Amino acid sequence: MEPVRTCVGCRARAPRSSLLRIVARDGALVIDEKAVLPGRGAWVHDTDRCVSTALKRRAFGRALRASTPLDTAELDARTTRESLQRNG
């Protein structure tokens, strides 16, 4: 049986393979495509809706237990790029 994780955006439980792992590296949120980077990870559905909800709620900082604000530029760029590809 495949491990189950909770999306920090929509709070729904899903199989690990259907979620994207995010880790904090040097004060920034980094997408861990292969889910192998060391440290605590936060899991989110790879959709604009879940990522934006998690960013608005500041769920990544809580899930990763970060004591300082995290740079969200990489995730912001990814959601913007995907929105442009879908709409354009």
Image: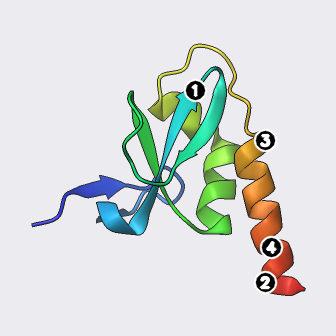
* Mark 1 → mark 4, Cα distance in angstroms: 25 Å
> Which badge, 2 or 1, comes first in the chain's sequence?
1
Mark 1 — residue? 25
The residue nearer to you, when weighing 35 against 9, is: 35
Q: In the rendered structure, which amino acid carries the disc numbered 4? A: Ser
Mark 4 — residue? 83
Mark 2 — residue? 86
Mark sitting on residue 73:
3
* Mark 4 → mark 2, Cα distance in angstroms: 5 Å
Q: How many C-alpha atoms fall within 10 Å of the one at disc 3: few (<14), some, or many (≥20)? A: few
Q: Secondary structure at mark 4?
A: helix
Q: In the rendered structure, which amino acid carries the disc numbered 2? A: Arg
Q: How many C-alpha atoms fall within 10 Å of the one at disc 4: few (<14), some, or many (≥20)? A: few
Position above or below: 78 against 58: below
Q: How many C-alpha atoms fall within 10 Å of the one at disc 2: few (<14), some, or many (≥20)? A: few
Position above or below: 43 against 72: below
The residue nearer to you, when weighing 68 against 26, is: 26
